[in-house]
Image: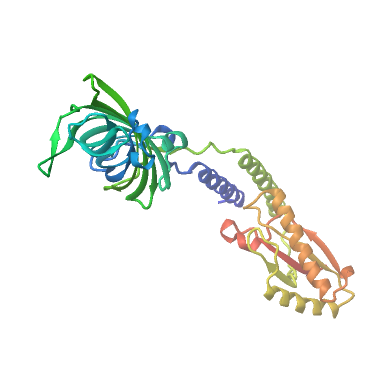
Amino acid sequence: MKKSTILSLMAALFIGQGAMAQSSQEITYVEAPEQGYLFNKFSDNWFISVEGGVNYYLDVNNEKRDFLDRFSPNAGIWVGKWFSPILGARVGGNFTQLKSLSKGNNGIGFYGTFEEYNKYHRNEFGFAIDGLLNLTNWWCGYRPGRCYNGILYGGAGYNWSYYPQTVNGKTEWKHGVYSDDALTAHVGLINNFNLNKHIALYIDLRAALITNEREAAFVHNTKIDPQAYIGLTYNFNRTDWSAPIVPVIPEIPDCSELEARLQAANGRIADLEAQLRDCLNRPVQTVVEKEEGPLCTIYYTIGSSKISRVDQKVLGAVAEVMKSNPGTTYEVCGWADNYTGTDAINTRLREARAKGVEKVLVKNGVSAAQLNVTTNNANLNDMGEKFVSLDRAVTIKKK
């Protein structure tokens, strides 16, 4: 096979490998939160909460009482589930004690007097169902591990009322004496602080509508009961959410650089073919003089012009040879491989490598007049890409 054919095949292989590397970029897969979040298994994202607090019953007669005397205890327990990072629901039971004043005097629920009024209280037990809306995830986007979440909720329930009545020194709780069992409604904001992945502490501020109290005319009257709770939540099983996985297709690469490199390679091939023809047509020499090799060759890593400590010592020895032959001129030539990098980068590398060697030689006492610093844009050995490391060098030889 002709040498020109071999050179053409090598250049085509080099260009083909570069194009294959550009076209073999793998498709990656990432989560896409902008497309929403996936539903977890039914057993995931359940929680249970226990809470305790106080209420401040807004009854007209209560305005006459001392401020601190209007507070009463509350308690509750909830079981719920989040269906997404934003929407959830819960169901639970609650206890509320309500205090008020009345001018009645039948002894039911009364436990003291205040001016012309009798103090009385009642206990309400009920259950409720709430819808939950995570405002933080809705407005700011879902982020696992977030410490604070503001949760808006609202719902309705049903309460049973009980009054204490003392008969012959014995207190009994009477059901449905002055108030009927009735529906209730409430709305509130949970300020949730995650302590870890499963446990959270929260402050719940709630406004409830109490609709089951009768006035003297036996007409239902709805009143507002502000409530505040401190609670603890335990989250079961998985507590986070996953977004859909979508492929990310890489952009189509710009092949203009490869085209330029191909053209440059074709130019080098044409030059080599011309040299080969000249060589083949040259008459056979009976005596071939062996060309004297370089005095020294310094090799570099890819993309570098830094001279190692070992090479610094080698150049020191070379400097001693040069100083002992002050009438001799030496050529310092910088080389770079043409298989990697662009022409501009390789030009800078050749110059930097040659200038670096010159600097070390002058530093070791060599006269700058003895040095002819130059570069060569061909490959030093040109043995192919497998031996590309041999083309990254600086050669020093006599002129």
Q: Is residue 38 above or below residue 220?
A: below
Residue 327's quadrant in the figure? bottom right
Identify the residue at horizontal 64%, vertical 44% (top origin): 261
Answer with left or right where residue 161 lies relative to residue 45: left
| 357 is higher (above) or lower (below) than 378 | below
Please state the total of marks drawn on the protein image: 0
Residue 306, given in percent of the width and then of the height, sits at 70, 65
Name the one closer to the observer, 160 or 63. 63
Residue drawn at x 45%, y 44% is 26
Left or right, residue 67 beside residue 163: right
Q: Quadrant of residue 305?
A: bottom right
At horizontal 28% and vertical 22% (from top left) the residue drawn is: 221
Q: Is residue 377 visible?
A: no
Q: Position of residue 163 (x, y in %)?
A: 18, 35
Image quadrant containing the C terminus: bottom right
In depth, the one of 15 and 55 nearer the eye is 55
